[in-house]
């Protein structure tokens, strides 16, 4: 099993080194020179979007909650289909019209004279929240390596994070997309093959999945966890609110806007859609099967004890525990490499996005002199290294679950950028003041709701902060409209 994992790491490094020479300037490093096709971008976007959150977080939530976890999955599927089939091509055309390489530059160039203010606010939000996101990926990778190979979690985080930081630093966006494609294939194979094998194991023991869920408790077979009325409505709304965040995730939307042509884009959206349906069905099914295995005594006592450790969010170990217990060593190595892939692909994309926010949107706006091409490339690499090391340091201090960290970062970024982008693409009356209001209210709304109101109300910050930011964007656009030219 460990030999397969080592082979995976070797292949990853070969891809990284072979593609690194393709980044000849800062444009290549940040955006791949707009030379990448739709299928590659679609697989890269999916690998980036489905991080340790999908492999550990969603499988863990399905194991912990039962049927009510379907609302999380449905919210994500709706969001993914919306950005690819409704929003994406408009975004690509807007990027072409403004010659934008990043979401931040696209938003700021819409309003002449406000570029520096808008890009500085937007970049600061990206850097702040994406560091939590990268932290969650490094932490998730450490959990998998610890539970699989017995590697202490500290060294698991070190191994995963240093590999990601290295290949991000040497190759930039082109290398990240190339490794993403490899990792997306590995992830989808794991999420298709593993549930099929586990279902055969259930059948060989004459175990009925539905009956096992019923045996676990009434809440496991209820779509609302036993809640009724307002409680049920809020639970469903909170789950579906994952869809809102997709409209404002720069690490995903950048890939849609940088596809080289409309023809490529149309191919890519179908690849992204099919991949999503298969991956989410597999992840949810793994969690449900985990419940059945525990109820029927097919998982050993030590593993059950680890899963029950709420202090360390043990329920998020259901994927690696099932792999270790029931998969053949070679297959287990492939599937656990898929789990690590989920972490690495997302972390790499977010590190590149953070570094580009610093180099392109903050330094680029305020630098008095434009750097020479070679110097700019090395400046990007150094900033990428710094961002990765900061995220690594944060991963050493994690107290929340992977699911919780991703939810927080997802809300902060999605609520800040989602309303602004939707209004820019679909409403002609949006103003620069409305966009600034969206960015600030989304960010601060997420922070305040998360720490002061979420626990008491039971309503996720993903929902409240997005609605608040959207309302502020519309209100301030109406109060302070753009002056007619």
Image (spheres, rainbow, N blue to C red):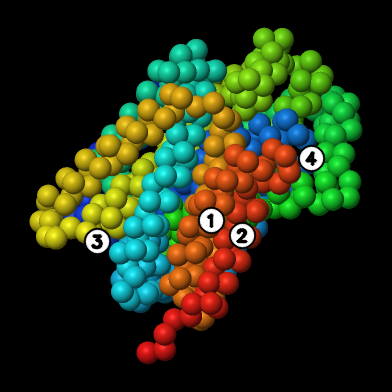
Residue shown at the point (73%, 53%) measured from the top left: 237
Give the label on residue 161, or none. none
Residue 326 makes an appearance in the image: no
- Tell me where residue 121 sits by quadrant: bottom left
- Badge 3 marks a residue whose secondary structure is helix
**Residue topped by disc 1:** 442
372 to the left or right of 52: left
Residue at 63% of width from left, 41% of height from top? 452
Q: Is residue 61 above or below residue 275?
A: above
Proximity of marks 3 and 4: CB atoms separated by less than 8 Å: no
Contact between marks 3 and 1 (CB within 8 A): the answer is no
Residue 227 x/y as whole percent: 86, 42
Q: How far apart are the two marked residues, 2 and 3, measured between alpha carbons?
A: 29 Å
Residue sitting at x 83%, y 46% = 231
Residue that carries the numbered disc 3 in the rendered image: 365
Q: CA–CA distance between discs 3 and 1?
A: 23 Å
Q: CA distance from mark 4 to mark 1?
A: 30 Å
**What residue do we see at 42% from left, 89% from top?**
484
Q: Which residue is mark 2?
A: 468
């Amino acid at each position: 099993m460990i030999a397969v994992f080592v082979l995976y790491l070797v292949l990853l490094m070969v891809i990284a080194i072979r593609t690194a020479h393709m980044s000849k300037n800062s444009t290549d490093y940040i955006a791949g020179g707009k030379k990448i096709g739709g299928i590659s971008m679609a697989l890269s976007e999916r690998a980036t979007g489905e991080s340790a959150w999908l492999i550990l977080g969603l499988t863990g939530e399905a194991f912990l909650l039962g049927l009510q976890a379907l609302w999380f999955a449905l919210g994500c599927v709706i969001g993914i289909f919306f950005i690819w089939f409704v929003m994406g091509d408009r975004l690509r055309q807007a990027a072409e019209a403004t010659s934008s390489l990043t979401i931040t530059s696209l938003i700021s160039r819409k309003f002449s004279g406000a570029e520096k203010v808008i890009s500085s606010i937007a970049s600061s939000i990206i850097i702040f929240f994406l560091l939590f996101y990268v932290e969650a990926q490094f932490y998730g990778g450490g959990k998998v390596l610890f539970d699989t190979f017995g590697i202490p979690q500290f060294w698991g985080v070190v191994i995963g994070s240093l590999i990601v930081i290295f290949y991000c630093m040497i190759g930039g966006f082109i290398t990240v997309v190339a490794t993403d494609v490899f990792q997306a294939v590995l992830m989808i194979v794991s999420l298709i093959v593993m549930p099929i094998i586990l279902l055969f194991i259930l059948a060989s023991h004459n175990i009925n999945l539905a009956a096992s869920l019923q045996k676990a408790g009434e809440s496991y077979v209820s779509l609302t966890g036993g809640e009724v009325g307002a409680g049920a409505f809020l639970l469903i709304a909170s789950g579906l609110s994952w869809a809102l965040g997709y409209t404002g995730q720069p690490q995903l939307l950048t890939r849609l806007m940088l596809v080289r042509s409309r023809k490529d884009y149309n191919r890519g959206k179908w690849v992204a859609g099919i991949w999503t349906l298969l991956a989410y069905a597999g992840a949810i099914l793994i969690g449900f099967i985990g419940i059945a295995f525990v109820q029927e005594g097919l998982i050993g006592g030590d593993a059950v004890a680890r899963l029950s450790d709420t202090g360390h969010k043990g329920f998020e170990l259901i994927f690696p525990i099932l792999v270790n217990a029931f998969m053949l060593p070679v297959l287990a190595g492939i599937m656990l490499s898929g789990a690590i892939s989920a972490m690495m692909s997302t972390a790499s994309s977010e590190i590149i996005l953070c570094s580009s926010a610093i180099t392109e949107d903050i330094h680029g706006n305020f630098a008095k002199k434009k750097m020479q091409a070679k110097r700019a490339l090395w400046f990007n690499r150094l900033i990428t290294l710094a961002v990765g090391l900061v995220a690594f340091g944060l991963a050493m201090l994690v107290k929340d679950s992977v699911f919780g960290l991703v939810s927080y970062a997802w809300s902060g970024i999605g609520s800040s950028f989602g309303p602004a982008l939707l209004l820019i693409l679909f409403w002609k009356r949006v103003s620069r003041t409305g966009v600034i209001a969206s960015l600030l209210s989304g960010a601060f709304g997420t922070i305040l709701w998360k720490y002061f109101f979420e626990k008491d109300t039971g309503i996720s910050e993903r929902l409240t902060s997005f609605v608040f930011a959207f309302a502020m964007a519309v209100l301030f656009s109406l109060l302070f409209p753009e002056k007619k030219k």
